[in-house]
Amino acid sequence: MTEHQKDLIQKFAALAGLLALILVFSLTSDAFFSMGNGMTVALQVTSIAYLGIAATCVIIAGGIDLSVGSVLALSGVVAAMVVKAGYSVPVGMFLGLVVGAFCGFLNGFCVTRLKLPPFIATLGMMLVARGVALQITGAQAISGLGDAFGELGNGSLFRVVKTTANGFPDVVFPGIPYPVILMVILAVVVAIMLSRTTLGRHIYAVGSNSEAARLSGVHVTRVTMFTYVLSGTLAGLTGCVLMSRLVTAQPNEGVMYELDAIASAVIGGTSLMGGVGSISGTAIGAFVIGILRNGLNMNGVSSFIQQIIIGLVILLTVWVDQMRNRR
């Protein structure tokens, strides 16, 4: 069985699990299978998807990034502080992305130049970025950012509102949230990059066998650096979108998000050994986690039990991945 066939089997298994979750929660909760809840789930999944896309590229190249949750928080508070200082929202968001990309660059530098294990390098960045976020904000939330700051996270496309006879607004269609549109665009662009470009093929080659890739003429250092910079940039984007949704910058935001990102990638068929994975599989994995949480919430399951269930799902998928690699 080829790696492509194994990837397809894993992807369809994840899709079957997703459909099974939708069926079960539709039967246990009348409100689950509704347009409003569907939009809520899609909006909740966006953060997992952004980080999952980044994690997929890094893992395919044979690395790991544990710092995205902290980089998310740092980028978000930097964007908020810039806006609070009187600059425009686009300038603040752009600087948030720059901070994320710089953190990713530092991760890549530590891995490629200092030859640190990716686990240790990104673990150090996780602590540093979180510490900087807490230090520059005094561990306090930044509020009073204005409606314009919340437009990216709370705005929607094709929203239809009509006025009733009493003069009150009635939402006919809530619209497609901007974060969801951004998620789809990112997924399509990165999927095309991985599957249709030379850079994408090099990422797979480095993850499959970095030494063979180097002997074949692939610039392993540059490819690895690219995946970490991309991961940092998408973490910065996630931070900007998340803080925009809250219209408040929280330096403690994003805790444990890196595990959701890695889990979504692995559930969708990305191998922790490197060289195998796809964005479509990661998207399925992100929705598995999002729908699982949403359905458990609607059925009154406590957050502690949810952690146990999601932890077991992660253990199961990693075990399946290990068994697949052994065979």
Image: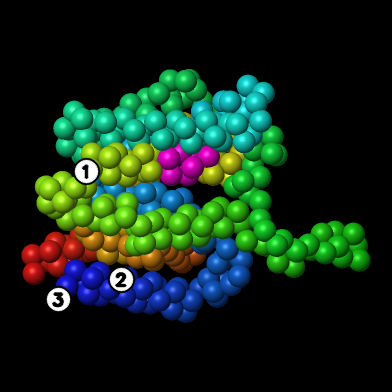
> Residue at the spot x=37%, y=49% of the render?
54
Residue range in magenta is 233-240
Q: Which mark is residue 220?
A: 1
As drawn, 173 above or below 150 = below
> Residue at the spot x=54%, y=74% of the render?
33
As drawn, 1 above or below 75 = below
Q: Is residue 239 magenta?
A: yes
Please, what is the three-letter code of the amino acid marked with disc 2?
Lys
In the picture, the quarter occupied by the N terminus is bottom left
Q: Is residue 53 visible?
A: yes
Instruction: Choose top left, top right, bottom left or bottom right for residue 165.
Output: bottom right
Q: Which mark is residue 1?
A: 3
- Counting residues from the N terminus, which is met first, the one under dot 3 or under dot 1? 3
As drawn, 168 above or below 25 = above
Please, what is the three-letter code of the amino acid marked with disc 1?
Val
Where's residue 12, x and y in %?
31, 75
As drawn, 273 above or below 89 = below
Q: From the viewer's perspective, is 134 left or right of 207?
A: right
Instruction: Choose top left, top right, bottom left or bottom right for residue 35.
Output: bottom right
Please, what is the three-letter code of the amino acid marked with disc 3?
Met
- Counting residues from the N terminus, which is met first, the one under dot 1 or under dot 2? 2
> Residue at the spot x=70%, y=62% of the render?
158
> Residue at the spot x=41%, y=35% of the render?
101
Q: Pointer 2: residues within 10 angstroms few (<14), some, or many (20+)?
A: many
Are the residues tagged 3 and 1 within 8 Å (C-beta)? no
Instruction: Choose top left, top right, bottom left or bottom right for residue 83.
Output: top right
Going by the picture, which residue comes out furthest to the left? Answer: 326
Q: Secondary structure at mark 1?
A: helix
